[in-house]
Amino acid sequence: MRERLLPVALLLLLGIGWGSTQPLGKIAASGGQGYLALVFWQSLIATLVTGAILLLRRRPVPLHAAGLRFALMIALIGTLVPNTTFYMSVHHLPAGVMSIIISLIPMLSFPLALALRMESFSLVRLCGLACGLAGVAAIALPRASLPDPAMAGWLPVALVGPLCYALEANIVARWGTAGLGPMQAMFLVCLAAAVLALPLAIMTGQWFLPWPPGRPERALFLLSGLHGILYATYVGLARRAGAVFAAQTSYVVTIAGVGWAMLILGERFSLWVWAALPLLMTGLFLVQPRGHQRASAEAQP
């Protein structure tokens, strides 16, 4: 019984923890600090956390040209760009809406995988993509869906993050991680992102020191540390229960993110936003791998 309940408990804890990073990100952005500097500090803290985990596990990080090229590429499309647009959009959009939008990642992954010829056409998964787009339309089109209709203009910026993450997932699935383990890869990616973000933050006048820490800085520290710890837990869950089981975290992240936004920030949502949530959950369900795709996903380390 314990062997069965432990993966479920880890799944719930992961989803609840990751769901909290959306409202925490909104609090971090509320201080008015530069977005690139926020990305630098988040990347640096995540580097320290993942580095500490590797040190405790006595796992050295191999340094070779292929690994460094991989780290720089993923740092750009998987951290620097999506995290910058996240802080830009979450400053203007409700954190709960951001949590709903993040569920688009697997739906956007499907057409990208088709373009890369990694997936065959599936009508069911195409319907899932349509449900996801309908969910976004339910938020973007009705004037009464958001607290301020002008917020809808930030939705395209918010969609950049899920698109980048979907592209990142397909690149990793297609070409691998240059021989790096998941935690080694994350350490190098976070380090590369910090190296890229630092000069950009200084040159654009966005640099700041998060000290003494106020409420925005404490939120930044917490969400940055959570990313490293939760990712390590996610990797462990995928190895223990399979990649497809671990991917179900997406459902919990979205629902928990909405709940945390209501609890921490006191956000309340229109009927249009509540209608978008089941549409996106349905889309997420429909784009999950099935048949031989599910079997191959379960075989991943």
Image (spheres, rainbow, N blue to C red):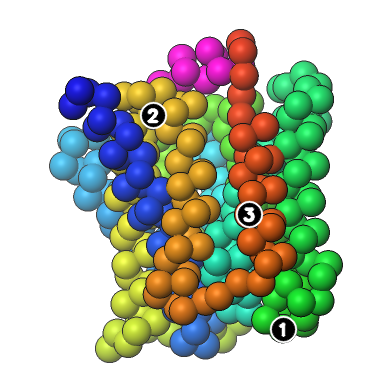
Label 3, residues with CA under 10 Å away: few <14, some 14-19, many ≥20: many
- 133 lies above or below 116: below
- SS state under label 3: helix
Task: Identify which residue is drawn at 80% across, 59% down.
Answer: 137
Quarter of the image with the C terminus in it? top left
Cα–Cα gap, marks 1 and 2? 40 Å
Residue 204: image x %, image y %?
Answer: 60, 81
**At label 2, which amino acid type do we have?**
Ala
Q: Is residue 51 left or right of residue 139?
A: left
The residues colored magenta run 293-301
Looking at the image, is mark 1 or mark 3 nearer the viewer? Answer: 3
In the picture, measured across the screen, residue 277 lies left or right of residue 225, that is right
Q: Is residue 18 magenta?
A: no
> In this orientation, does residue 65 appear?
no
Q: Is residue 254 visible?
A: yes
| Amino acid carrying mark 1 in the image | Asp
For label 3, the residue is 277
Q: Is residue 238 shown left or right of residue 103? A: left
Residue 215 to residue 152: above or below: below
- Left or right placement of residue 135 versus residue 201 in this view: right
- Numbered badge on residue 238: 2
Judged by its main secondary structure, the magenta piece is helix
